[in-house]
Image (cartoon, helix red, strand yellow):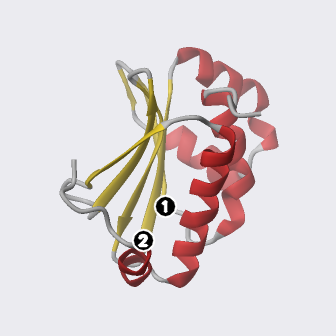
Amino acid sequence: MLNTVPTAEELTNLVGESLYELWGNLTAFIEENYDMERLWNSGGKAWKYEYKYRRGGKTLCSLYARENRIGFMIIFGKEERAKFEADRDRYAKETQAVYDSAKTYHDGKWMMFEPKNAALFEDFMKLLCIKRKPNRK
């Protein structure tokens, strides 16, 4: 846990305005559609911040921030991978490439996206819906 949560200004200064806007759009979508616990942590060696969405001990996804970069991490278990693979043609080539190159661990396939713009936003929404059905509608 972080002692102090970064302000909107601090995050904007860290990642830049366009990526902060994408961060805001992602968090707005998640918070409108999912009732989740939100946790700020340090981002480890690679990132300055981690912002994790969890419920009942299960993580929906995590967002990461560092200088001029953001990350979107989602982990798919066996059933979720099967759903993605059955529909993979509905996803951008870049999303498919991240999926294909993601390492699979005992607890699932760890997909880390580092979006430069909103091009994959729709894919992120579909991936979240595979991970967990929205529970705020």
Would residue 95 be found to the left or right of residue 98 on screen?
Answer: right
Marks 1/2 in contact by CB < 8 Å: the verdict is yes
Residue 124: image tag: none
What residue do we see at 53% from left, 83% from top?
17
Foreground: 90 or 22? 22
Name the kind of residue labelled 1 in the image: Glu
Q: Is residue 18 above or below residue 122?
A: below
* Residue sticking out furthest to the top: 79
Residue 93 drawn at (x, y percent): 70, 52
In the image, residue 63 lies at what x, y percent? Answer: 44, 53
Residue identified by numbered label 2: 69
Rendering coords of residue 61 (x, y %): 49, 40
Query: Is residue 110 shown left or right of residue 131?
Result: left
Lower sequence index among marks 1 and 2: 2
**At numbered mark 2, what does the secondary structure look like: helix, strand or loop?**
strand
The residue carrying mark 1 is 114
Using a 10 Å C-alpha cutoff, classify the residue at mark 2 as few (fewer than 14 neighbours), some (14 to 19) or many (20 or more). Answer: some
